[in-house]
Amino acid sequence: MRRALLFALALFSLPALAAGALKPFSASYTADWKQLPVSGTASRSLEAIGNDQWKLSFEASMLVASLTEQSTLRFENSALLPQSYLYERSGLGKGKKIEHSFDWKSKQVVGSDRGNPVRLPLNRGLLDKSSYQLALQYDVAAGKQSMSYQVVDGDEVETYDFRVLGEEVVRTKAGMVDAIKVERVRDPTQTTRKTVLWFAKDWNYLLVRLHQVETDGKEYQIMLKEGTVDGKPVEGRRD
């Protein structure tokens, strides 16, 4: 259950983006667990902060935990280049803090993971645990059917794989939304965890739903409550 709560809070190859592809957005979500009477809220946003830089933020709170996650990144030559990453969590056992700085001149990632120093080689295409979600969003928008990302995860680099399952209509509080359904690809010999995400086709592929099944069978879901894309409120179809 602890892993499921952490994943819910942490809600989510080098992407080549067309000029002007990045659009600011903000979204709020509700979270529900089938096995426990626990509910929570989360918000996610992307905003331009000048000099071709963007800030991607995520905040979540629930009965037993709270989390803040923030990335700054550059949009350069149609690519995402992370600049910094911060993750802070409290309320689930011991607190956790991770900080990464991406030094593209020295080609190194430096920082700390729960007080332990981190130093990793930095190659073009490497993303942090927040910016890869943005890359996934725009790769789905570009029509890709399978995606793979190299992600700085704590004090190491891991490969995150995804594949498109098809199209589906999602019922949200903002209305019925046409979405692309995507799943995280994992080695079934290593884990039985399942993660499925839905991205809104008509709203710059904003994340509108996430469903997680843990190895112990516990399930939870995050669903869009309301949002804006490029200043326009998300409005789905009504029954």
Image (tube, rainbow, N blue to C red):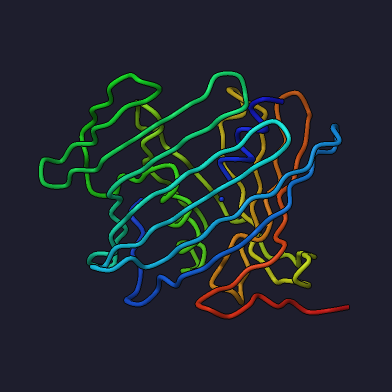
Residue 193 x, y percent position in the rendering: 66, 32
Residue 119 x, y percent position in the rendering: 23, 27
Q: Is residue 163 above or below residue 234?
A: above
Residue 158 located left or right of residue 145: left
Residue 59 x, y percent position in the rendering: 56, 48
Residue 33 located left or right of residue 201: right
For residue 219, what is the image quadrant? top right
Tell how many labels.
Answer: 0
Q: Is residue 85 above or below residue 202?
A: above
Picture residue at 50% right of the left edge, 77% below the top: 230
Residue 101 located left or right of residue 221: left
Q: Nearer the viewer, residue 184 or 46?
A: 46
Q: Is residue 119 above or below residue 76?
A: above
Picture residue at 76% right of the left edge, 67% below the top: 169
Q: Quadrant of the C terminus?
A: bottom right
Q: Nearer the viewer, residue 39 or 11?
A: 39
For residue 173, what is the image quadrant? bottom right
Residue 81 x, y percent position in the rendering: 28, 54
Residue 139 located left or right of residue 85: right
Picture residue at 60% right of the left edge, 55% below the top: 43
Picture residue at 44% right of the left edge, 72% below the top: 23
